[in-house]
Image (cartoon, grey):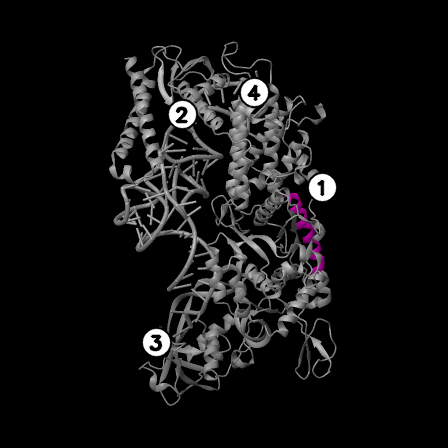
RNA sequence: AGGCGCGUAGCUCAGCUUGGUUAGAGCGCUACCUUGACACGGUAGAGGUCAGCGGUUCGAGUCCGCUCGCGCCUACCA
C-alpha cells in the first residue's frame, strides 16, 4: 500500500464530499435504465416551493429519501429518485410582491406580462439554490429528469386533467361562498384557511319588529348586519314562535326583512335564541338563505371595505365599520349587551389576514366522486400509510370532503383553460381558442389561475409524461414510496391519490411515509421570530453532510417530531471520526495479501474472527430489516453500535497485537496459553468487515464511506456496489456465546480493579472455575485476548484451587476468583462488596419466591420457568462466593 | 364538539404490535487513564415507584378502563 493512498490523519468531510458527489453524478449512477430488467424502485420528491431556501425539514426528507433510494439501488433495483420544484402560486407570488413593495411598486403597476418575467427570474434563482443544497446533502437524484410544475410538459398534463374533469362534469363553475383573502385578493380553498382560537367580542343588539316590539340577536361580527336579510328563530321556541312571518325594520338601512323559523341554524339554548342571518357573508347563513329563498346582499369590496350596499358606512374598512355600526346602534338605543367570546377565526395561510366568507364566481372540483376510490385505495391496502394511525385521519377527511375551490385570482400559475363569449357561453379546451364553441363569437380567456395544489395533485403523472403513454410512465408508474410531512396529508397526498386513481385506475404510490416535524433542542417549533431556525447548509458546513444525515435519520422515530440538538450532531460527527480513525488503524496494518471475506472458511477461523463475523451478520440483517420497515432510528442505532462497540471497542482491541507490532501484546506472552491466530486471517477479517460495514453504512453516510472504501481498495464505488445481505454463512452461536462470556469476565475484572482502587494497568491473577467442557475450551483458546483485555498476569482456566484471599464472584455464568496484589480487601471495598451481597440476596429472594409460586410453575412456558431456575441458581452461587470472599478475610 | 399522538434516567428518546431474565441508548454527570487508530478517545460508575388510579393475568412499562397533564388535526356554534 503506497503512502499516497493512506487515509489522512484528520477527518475532514469538506475535502471529499463535493468530489464524490460530482463523481457519482458524472458516472450516471443516479439515472435508471429505461427499459430495464431490474425491478423498479421509484421515489418522487415532494417538490420544494421555489419560495426560498431549503429548511431543516427538507433536509430530513431528503436524507430519508436518499437513504432508501441508495439502499434500493445497491440492492439491485432500477432506482429512480425524481427531483423537482413547485411554482407554489400564492406563496411565491406573495414573496415577489413583497419585494416589489420594497421597491415602491406593485404587480398591478407592472402589469401581468412584466410581473411574470419577474416571477420567472425569481424562480430560476431559487430553483438553483435548491438543487445546490440537495447536492450538498448528497441527494442522489436523477437530475436529468428534474421537473418544475410550470414546465410545458407538466402544464399540458394539468390542462388535460382540467379539460377531462370538466367534460366528465367533475369540474364546474359556480357562484357561491368561498374563502376570500382581502390582502391577497384571491379565493382560497378550505385547507388554506388556518383557524385560530381568538378572544373576540360578542355583541347583542335589538332589531325593531315591524308593528311593535323587538327581537334581540347576538353576533361576533356586528358590521355584517348591513347585509342581514332575515332573523331566524327556532320554530318550536315559545318565546318567538308568534313572531315568525313578521318583519323587522333595519335600523341603519332603508329596508326590512322577515323573521323565519329554522331548526337547523338555531339552537334555542344559545344566546338569545334568535340569530341574525347574513347569507352573503357566512356559510351557515348562506345555507339558511337557500332554504328560505332569502336575498344575498354582499356588503364588502374585494379588499375588505364596505361597498355601496352599506349605505352611510360605504368605504369603511371592516374593523372601522364594526366600530361605526356599534356606535350607530348605540345612538339608536339598540345595544343590549356585550361580552368577550372565544371562537375560531379563519386566517390566510400565506399572509395571516383574516379571511372573509365571500360570494364569488369560482371553479370547483366535485370532490366526493374522486374521494371514493381514494378511500378504497387505502382501505384495500393498495396504499399503505406509515405510521398507520394516519389512516384514521385520512378516512375522516375524505369521508367528509367538500368541493374544492381551485380558481385563484393570481397571475403566477396555470391559467384556467376556459374561454367566455359575451353571450355567456363557456368553452373549455386543450388549445387556446378565439371563437366560442357554442356560438362562434369572440372569446376571452379566464383571467384566473389554478390552485397550486391542483398541479401538485398531478405530480406523479405529469412528471412521467402523462397523458402520453411514455416509457417513463410504463417503467415507473405507479411509484414505490413517498416520503413527506404529515402536514400535507390532505393538501397533497390525498389529492394525488384521488387524481391517480381517477386517471389511471391505480394509486400513484404503494407506500407513504409521513415524517414528523423537526424542532429545536427543547422541542420548540422552529420559527424566524423565535430565532431558533437551523439552516441545513450551515450544519453541513459545521459537521459535514454525513453527520447531519446520520443525525436526522437516527432521530426519525416513526410518527414523532424530531428534537434536533446540535450536541447530538456533534456526537454523530464523533462517530464519523471514530470510523475514520478505526479505518486508518486497520489500513496502516494491511500488507496487501488480505483475502476477501467470501474466500474465508468460517470453520477455520479463531473465535474472535468467528465472533465479529457472526455479530456483523446479525447487524446486516438488522439494517436491512430496519430500512425495509422505515425504522431509520433503529437501523442507525444498530450500525452505530456495531461500528463503535463491537468492532472498535472489542474486535480491534482483540486484534491489535496481531495487526500491529511483533509480539502478541499479552502479559501472558511466553506462557503456554491460548491458540495461535493466523495474522493474515485477522487482517483479512478486519479489512473485510470494515469494507462491508462501509457498504452497510453507505446509504446513511455516503461520502465518508466512499472515501474510506476507496482508500482501502474496495473494488467498485459503493454507490453501485451490492448491499450486504445476511446469508447465514457466518452465523455462529457458539462464538457469540464464548465471546459474550469472555466479555463478561473482562468487565468483571476491570470493575473489581476499579472498585479496589488499583490503577488500570495493575496486573492481576485470574482463576476461572466451574466451567463445562465447551466453555472451558473456548476461554482457554481466548486466554491471550482475555489476558490482555482484562490486564491479567496469571490466568488459570478451569482452576481447581484458588489462592486464599482472592475475590470470588460470578460473571457470565462463570465462577471466577481475582487475586489482588496486596491480598487484602480494605474497609471501603468490603463495604461495597457487602452492599452488592445485599442486592444479590434481595434478588435471590425474589427469584425464589417466583419459583415457589405454583401458578407460575404451572402456567408459564417451560423455557421461562427454566430461565428463572437458572437465574436463581446463578444468584445462589454468586451469594455463596461473595460470602466466601468476605468471610475468608475477617 | 369530535379525532389522533404523547407522558419511561438531569435532557432528548427507544422498548409497548406478539405481557416473562437485572427496563435500554445518546448526550450530560462522577472517578480513573495521554495503554501500540481515535481525548471528537478509553475504562469503570452514579442515576428510573416506566404520569396517577383501578382491572385482566401466575406475571403488566407492555393489554383493558378511568383520571390528570402536554401537543396536534378536523369542525358551521350565532
Q: Quadrant of residue A353?
A: bottom right
**Mark closer to the observer (1, 4):** 4
Left or right of A706? Residue B58 is left
On the image, the x and y values in percent for residue B61 come to 35, 43
Q: Residue at x 51, y 54 (%)?
A: A385
Q: Of marks 2 and 4, which one's residue comes earlier in the chain? A: 4
Left or right of A213? Residue A732 is right
Q: Of marks 1 and 2, which one's residue comes earlier in the chain? A: 1
Please provide the residue range marked out in magenta.
A119-138
- On screen, residue A145 above or below A602: below
Residue ID for mark 2: A812
Same chain assignment for discs 2 and 4? yes
Left or right of A267? Residue A583 is right
**Mark closer to the observer (2, 4):** 2
Density class for disc 2 (Cα within 10 Å; few <14, some 14-19, many ≥20) is: some
Residue A126 part of the magenta segment: yes
Density class for disc 3 (Cα within 10 Å; few <14, some 14-19, many ≥20) is: some
Foreground residue, A370 or B19?
B19
Which quarter of the figure is the C terminus of chain A placed in?
Answer: top left
Q: Which mark is residue A656?
A: 4
**Mark closer to the observer (4, 3):** 4
Q: Residue at x 57, y 30 (%)?
A: A578
Can residue A346 be spotted in the picture? yes
- Label 3 sits on a secondary structure element that is loop
Same chain assignment for discs 3 and 2? yes
Q: Quadrant of residue A846?
A: top left
User: Residue under mark 1: which chain is it in?
Assistant: A
User: Residue under mark 2: which chain is it in?
Assistant: A
Q: Of marks 4 and 3, which one's residue comes earlier in the chain? A: 3
Dominant SS type (magenta) = helix
Amino acid at each position: 500500500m503506497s503512502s499516497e493512498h493512506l487515509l489522512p490523519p484528520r477527518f475532514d468531510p469538506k475535502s471529499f464530499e463535493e468530489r464524490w458527489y460530482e463523481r457519482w453524478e458524472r458516472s450516471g449512477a443516479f439515472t435508471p435504465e429505461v427499459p430495464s430488467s431490474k425491478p423498479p424502485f421509484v421515489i418522487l420528491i415532494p417538490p420544494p416551493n421555489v419560495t426560498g431556501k431549503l429548511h431543516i425539514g427538507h433536509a430530513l426528507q431528503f436524507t430519508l429519501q436518499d437513504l432508501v433510494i441508495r439502499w434500493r439501488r445497491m440492492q439491485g433495483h432500477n432506482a429512480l429518485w425524481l427531483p423537482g420544484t413547485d411554482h407554489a402560486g400564492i406563496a411565491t407570488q406573495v414573496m415577489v410582491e413583497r419585494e416589489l413593495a420594497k421597491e415602491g411598486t406593485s404587480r398591478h403597476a407592472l402589469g401581468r406580462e412584466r410581473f411574470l418575467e419577474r416571477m420567472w427570474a425569481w424562480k430560476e434563482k431559487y430553483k438553483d439554490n435548491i438543487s445546490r443544497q440537495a447536492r450538498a446533502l448528497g441527494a442522489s437524484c436523477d437530475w436529468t429528469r428534474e421537473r418544475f410544475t410550470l414546465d410545458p410538459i407538466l402544464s399540458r398534463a394539468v390542462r388535460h386533467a382540467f379539460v377531462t374533469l370538466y367534460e366528465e362534469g367533475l369540474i364546474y363553475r359556480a357562484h357561491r361562498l368561498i374563502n376570500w383573502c382581502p390582502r391577497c385578493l384571491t379565493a382560497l380553498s378550505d385547507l388554506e384557511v388556518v383557524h385560530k382560537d381568538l378572544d373576540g367580542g360578542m355583541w347583542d343588539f335589538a332589531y325593531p319588529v315591524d308593528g311593535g316590539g323587538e327581537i334581540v340577536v347576538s353576533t361576533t361580527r356586528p358590521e355584517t348586519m348591513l347585509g342581514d336579510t332575515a332573523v331566524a328563530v327556532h320554530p318550536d321556541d315559545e318565546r318567538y314562535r308568534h313572531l315568525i312571518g313578521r318583519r323587522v325594520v333595519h335600523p341603519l338601512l332603508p329596508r326590512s326583512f322577515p323573521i323565519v323559523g329554522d331548526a337547523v341554524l338555531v339552537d334555542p339554548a344559545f344566546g338569545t335564541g334568535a340569530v341574525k342571518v347574513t347569507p352573503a357573508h357566512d356559510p351557515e347563513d348562506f345555507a339558511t338563505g337557500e332554504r328560505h329563498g332569502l336575498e344575498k346582499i354582499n356588503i364588502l369590496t374585494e379588499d375588505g371595505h364596505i361597498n355601496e350596499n352599506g349605505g352611510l358606512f360605504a368605504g369603511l374598512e371592516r374593523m372601522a365599520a364594526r366600530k361605526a355600526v356599534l356606535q350607530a346602534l348605540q345612538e339608536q338605543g339598540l345595544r343590549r349587551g356585550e361580552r368577550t367570546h372565544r371562537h375560531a377565526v379563519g386566517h390566510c395561510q400565506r399572509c395571516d389576514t383574516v379571511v372573509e366568507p365571500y360570494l364569488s364566481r369560482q371553479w370547483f372540483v366535485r370532490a366526493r366522486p374522486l374521494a371514493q376510490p381514494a378511500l378504497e385505495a387505502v382501505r384495500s391496502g393498495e396504499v399503505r400509510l406509515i405510521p398507520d394511525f394516519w389512516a384514521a385521519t385520512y378516512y375522516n377527511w375524505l369521508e367528509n370532503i367538500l368541493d374544492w375551490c381551485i380558481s385563484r385570482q393570481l397571475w403566477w400559475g396555470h391559467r384556467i383553460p376556459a374561454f367566455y363569449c359575451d353571450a355567456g357561453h363557456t368553452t373549455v379546451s386543450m388549445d387556446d381558442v378565439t371563437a366560442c364553441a357554442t356560438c362562434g363569437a369572440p372569446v376571452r380567456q379566464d383571467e384566473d389561475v389554478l390552485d397550486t395544489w391542483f398541479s401538485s395533485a398531478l405530480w406523479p403523472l405529469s412528471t412521467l409524461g402523462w397523458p402520453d403513454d411514455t416509457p417513463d410512465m410504463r417503467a415507473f408508474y405507479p411509484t414505490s414510496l413517498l416520503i413527506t410531512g404529515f402536514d400535507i396529508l390532505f393538501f397533497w397526498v390525498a389529492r394525488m391519490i384521488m387524481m391517480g386513481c381517477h386517471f389511471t385506475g391505480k394509486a400513484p404510490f404503494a407506500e407513504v411515509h409521513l415524517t414528523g416535524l423537526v424542532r429545536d433542542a427543547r422541542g420548540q417549533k422552529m420559527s424566524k421570530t423565535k430565532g431558533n431556525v437551523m439552516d441545513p447548509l450551515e450544519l453541513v458546513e459545521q459537521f459535514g453532510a454525513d453527520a447531519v444525515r446520520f443525525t436526522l435519520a437516527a432521530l426519525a422515530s416513526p410518527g414523532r417530531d424530531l428534537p434536533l440538538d446540535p450536541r447530538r450532531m456533534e456526537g454523530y460527527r464523533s462517530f464519523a471520526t471514530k470510523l475514520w480513525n478505526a479505518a486508518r488503524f486497520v489500513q496502516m496494518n494491511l500488507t496487501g495479501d488480505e483475502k476477501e471475506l467470501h474466500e474465508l472458511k468460517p470453520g477455520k477461523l479463531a473465535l474472535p474472527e468467528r465472533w465479529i463475523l457472526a455479530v456483523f451478520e446479525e447487524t446486516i440483517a438488522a439494517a436491512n430489516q430496519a430500512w425495509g420497515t422505515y425504522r431509520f432510528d433503529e437501523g442507525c442505532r444498530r450500525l452505530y453500535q456495531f461500528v463503535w462497540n463491537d468492532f472498535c471497542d472489542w474486535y480491534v482491541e482483540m486484534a491489535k497485537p496481531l495487526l500491529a507490532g511483533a509480539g502478541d501484546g499479552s502479559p501472558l506472552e511466553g506462557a503456554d496459553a491460548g491458540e495461535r491466530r493466523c495474522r493474515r486471517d485477522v487482517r483479512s477479517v478486519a479489512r473485510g468487515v470494515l469494507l462491508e460495514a462501509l457498504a452497510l453504512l453507505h446509504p446513511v453516510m455516503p461520502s465518508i464511506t466512499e472515501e474510506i472504501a476507496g482508500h482501502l481498495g474496495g473494488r467498485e464505488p459503493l454507490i453501485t456496489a451490492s448491499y450486504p445481505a445476511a446469508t447465514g454463512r457466518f452465523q455462529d452461536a457458539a462464538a457469540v456465546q464464548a465471546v459474550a462470556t469472555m466479555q463478561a469476565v473482562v468487565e468483571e475484572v476491570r470493575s473489581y480493579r476499579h472498585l479496589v482502587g488499583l490503577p488500570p494497568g495493575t496486573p492481576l491473577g485470574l482463576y476461572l472455575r466451574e466451567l463445562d467442557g465447551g466453555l472451558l475450551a473456548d476461554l482457554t483458546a481466548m486466554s491471550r485476548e482475555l489476558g490482555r483485555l482484562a490486564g491479567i498476569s496469571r490466568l488459570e482456566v478451569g482452576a481447581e484451587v484458588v489462592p486464599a484471599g482472592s475475590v470470588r464472584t460470578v460473571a457470565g455464568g462463570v465462577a471466577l476468583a481475582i487475586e489482588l496484589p496486596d491480598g487484602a480487601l480494605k474497609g471501603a471495598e468490603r463495604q461495597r462488596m457487602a452492599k452488592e451481597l445485599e442486592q444479590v440476596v434481595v434478588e435471590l429472594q425474589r427469584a425464589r419466591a417466583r419459583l415457589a409460586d405454583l401458578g407460575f410453575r404451572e402456567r408459564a412456558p417451560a423455557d421461562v420457568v427454566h430461565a428463572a431456575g437458572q437465574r436463581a441458581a446463578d444468584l445462589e452461587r454468586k451469594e455463596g462466593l461473595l460470602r466466601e470472599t468476605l468471610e475468608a478475610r475477617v
